[in-house]
Image: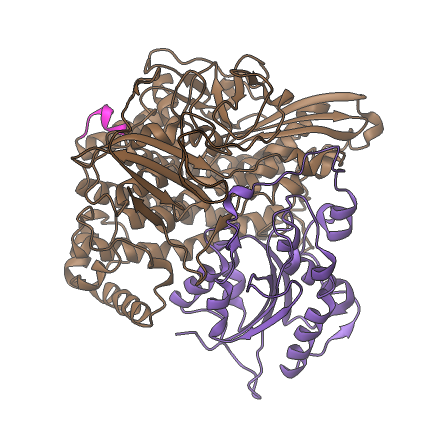
Chain colours: A purple, B brown
Amino acid sequence: MDHQNVMSPDGQPQSILILGIGNVLWADEGFGVRCVERLAERFSFPPTVRVLDGGTQGLYLLPFLEEADALIVFDAVDYGLTPGTMKIVEGDEVPAFMGAKKMSLHQTGFQDVIATARLMGYCPGRLLLIGCQPKELEDFGGGLRAVTAAQIDPAIAVALDQLSRWGVAVETGRADDSLLADPAIRRDAYEAGRPSEDQACRTGDKRFFPEQA
Amino acid sequence: MGATPNGFNLDSTGKRIVVDPVTRIEGHMRCEVNVDEQGIIRNAVSTGTMWRGLEVILKGRDPRDAWAFTERICGVCTGTHALTSVRAVEDALGITIPNNANSIRNIMQLNLEIHDHVVHFYHLHALDWVNPINALKADPKATSELQQIVSPSHPMSSPGYFRDVQNRLKAFVESGQLGLFKNGYWDNPAYLLPPEADLMATTHYLEALDLQKEIVKIHTIFGGKNPHPNWLVGGVPCPINVDGTGSVGAINMERLNMVSSIIDKCMEFNKNVYIPDVVAIGGFYKNWLYGGGLSGKSVMAYGDIPENPNDFSAENLYLPRGAIINGNLNEVHDVDQRDPEQVQEFVDHSWYTYGEPGKGLHPWDGVTEPKYELGPNAKGTRTNIIELDEAAKYSWIKAPRWKGHAMEVGPLARYVVGYAKGHEDIKNQVDGLLRTMNLPLTALFSTLGRTAARALESEYCGRLQKHFFDKLVQTIKNGDSTTANVEKWDPKTWPKEAKGVGATEAPRGALGHWIKIKDGRIENYQCVVPTTWNGSPRDVAGNIGAFEASLMDTKMERPEEPVEILRTLHSFDPCLACSTHVMSPDGHEMANVKVR
C-alpha cells in the first residue's frame, strides 16, 4: 500500500527524513530528539536529507512523511532490555516495535502516524528505527541518563551507515538545524539549567507505573 | 450518598465499572462509574495522572524562554501554551506588542483552534458515532445521493469517488493493520448510522487528513517552522518584507497569498463538510441527549482573540469571556484571573497537600506538594488500584474552582457564555443550527451540543482568521511592518520583582499561566489547563467536576462496552498530556473495562 516515490535510476531514495521523536521533558524519553540535535551539530547533508525534531507530535508529522521516500527514526523504546541496549528495526517491523513503548505522551503515537500515512498511501517505502532502551522515564524535567546518552554516537553511526548504503554523501560539518528545538531547550541548556532538587520538588507520579510493567 | 451542592444525586450502590485508560485522548485518564439495574450511571468518578508542576522545570530559568518549555508539555496545544506563556511574561513586565504581532498571533491561535477542532471531530471523536467497519457495507451510489442532500455544494460526491474510498478502506482493514480503528465496539447497538452515512463520514475522515496537512502550513509561515513554531516575547519572530522574494524567513506577498488560500480552504471545509456532517450525524442521534453535566449550570471562559493589541477587556475579545453559575443565563459574571478570590485550586480530593483542609490557593501562590494516599474504601494496592475511594483523595488533578463553583470550560462553555451575552455571531449560529435540526435550546446542553459548538466555533474562527488576515494586509499597506517590540528585551530594564498572568482560550477551554519573576529569573510558574477544570475531582463541599457531572444519568447499552462513557468524555476533547499512560505489552492500548 505504500507509494513508490520517484527513485533515482539506481533505485536509491531521493528524499530522506531523519526524525527524532520523544519528549525532552521526561528524561530518557528525549533520546530521539537529542540524537538528531547531535547529528545536526556534527554532519552536513545534501538537500535531499531533512533532519527534524518531531517531539511528541502526531498528525503534524504527516506532511514530512509524505515528502520522504525513506525514513530514519531515533526513539527511546521500551523493549524490556538492559538500559542503553540499542535495537535496530527495519521495514514492516517498525510499526509494531514503535507500539512496544510502555509510555507515550501522545495518544496519536508514532505508530498511528505510520498507520495513517499508510492509509493515505504515502508512507515512506523504507523505514529504519534506531531505538534505545531507556533507563529513566519518570523524571519530569530531567535529562538523559549517562547510559542512554552514551548511545547517541553509536545510534548516529547506524544512521550514517544506512545513509551511505543509500548513496548519500555525508560530510563533517553542521546540518540545517532550522527544524530542531529552540536553543533554550537543547540538551546542554536544558540539563544545565534544571532547578535543583531543593528548589523544586521532583516527586513523580508512581501510581501509573505498575511494578510489573 | 445523596445530592451534591451542584445538583446531582449520587448513588454508588450499583455495579462499579472501571474504564482505564480512557482511549483516544491525550494522556492518561481513568474513570469509574456505578450503574443501577437499568444500566443508568448513578455515580461517576474521574481521575487523572496530571503531574502538572511545571515550576519543577522552570524555576530559575529565563522568562523569555518559558514558551519553548511550555510548548513541549503537550503534543497538540503546542502553540496555545507558547502564546499563553509569552502573554504571561509580557503582562508581568509591561511589554506591549505591535498591531501586526496581534494579528499574526490571532491568525495562528485561530488556526490552531480550527486544526484541533477538525482533527478532534474526525480523528478522535467521530468513531464514537461513526462505524468505519459498517461503511464497508454501504452502496456507493446511495452514499453519493446522501452526500448531495447533506451538502449540495461539496464537490466530492460521485459514486465512483465513494467506491474508491470504500475499496481503499477495505484493503486497509483486510491488511490486518486496523491500527486506527482498533479497539472499537463496532457491533454495539449504540451505533445508529446507516452504512451510507458511515461511508460518507469515514470519507471525510480522509479529507480532513488532507486538509490538516494544509492548515499547519500557516504555523510554518508565521512561526518559522512546524511542529514547534517559534514565539517571541514582545511580538512575533517573523519579519515582514512584502517587497522581498523568497528571502529566508521573512513574510512576503507570496507567503501571504499562501496564508490567504489556506484560510479559504478551511472556510470551505467548515461550510461544506464539517458542519453538514455534524448536522447529519447529529440527526441520527437526536434522542441521545445525555451528557449535559455542568454545561447548563456553571460554565466559564477567559475569552480570547483581541481586536486591538494589549487590550484584554471583555469588549475587545471575539471569543467571549464570562462565568455563568447555577444555570442563570440572565447573569454573566466577569472573570478576573488576578483576583485571589476567583480562581482557586483545592486539593482535598487530590493527591497533594496544602497543610490544612478546605483551603484554596490562587495560582500565583500555588504549591504542588504531593501526598499520595488511598482512602479506606479503596481496593487494591498503591501501585495497582482496583477501585478508587472517591470519599478520600483520588486524583492527581487538582480541583480548580471559580468563586467556589465547579465549572465546565471549552467550546460549549464559550458558546453558552456568548449566547447568554447576546454575542451576535454566536447567537445567529446557535439559533440557526437549532432551527435546522428542529431542536430546543436545552438540546445544546448535551454531549452532542458540545460537539456541535466545536463545529460552529471552527466556522466562526475561520471568519475571524479572514478578518485578521485582511487587517494584517491593510496595516502593511499603510506602511507599518513592525512585528516586535524589543524595548524591554534586556532584563536590566525589568523591575526586581514582577508577576503576571497570561490567558487564552485553548481549543479545549480556558487556559491560564501565572508567572512570578525575581531578579530576571522565574520564581514561580503555574499553569491551570482546561482539562484541570473539566477533569477536576470533587471539592470539600462535595461538588463534582464537569466530566463526572456529564456522565450522570446516562443509560449504557452494554455496561461492559463503555461507548457512551467514551462518547461523552471525548466530547470535551480531554487532554492530559502532561501525564503519561501505559500500554499493554503488545502495544495495543486497550481500554481495560472491568465490571464489578
Q: Main secondary structure of the magenta part?
A: helix
Examine the rendered structure and indicate whether residue B286 appears above or below residue A23.
Answer: above
Where's the C terminus of chain B, which quadrant?
top left
Res. B302 in view: no
Quarter of the image where one finds residue B240: top right
How many numbered marks appear?
A: 0
**Which residue is rendered at x = 48% and y = 14% of the image?**
B403
Q: What stretch of residues is rendered in magenta?
A: B439-444
Q: Nearer the viewer, residue B173 or B188?
A: B188
Examine the rendered structure and indicate whether residue B202 appears above or below residue B83.
Answer: below
Q: Describe residue B86's horizontal placement relative to residue B295 as left or right.
A: right
Q: Is residue B440 magenta?
A: yes
**Which residue is rendered at x = 25% and y = 30% of the image?**
B432
Q: Describe residue A152's horizontal placement relative to residue B390 as left or right.
A: right
Find residue B246 and report its horizontal and vertical position in percent.
65, 57
Give the residue furthest to the right: B492
Give the residue furthest to the bottom: A10
Q: Is residue B245 magenta?
A: no
Find residue B117 and report its horizontal and vertical position in percent.
41, 42
Res. B114 in view: yes
Q: Nearer the viewer, residue B485 or A10?
A: A10
Q: Describe residue B230's horizontal placement relative to residue B566 as left or right.
A: right
Q: Nearer the viewer, residue B383 or B4?
A: B383
Find residue B276 and report its horizontal and vertical position in percent.
26, 44
Q: Nearer the viewer, residue B486 or B290?
A: B290
Where's the N terminus of chain B, which quadrant?
top left
Examine the rendered structure and indicate whether residue A54 appears above or below residue B125.
Answer: below
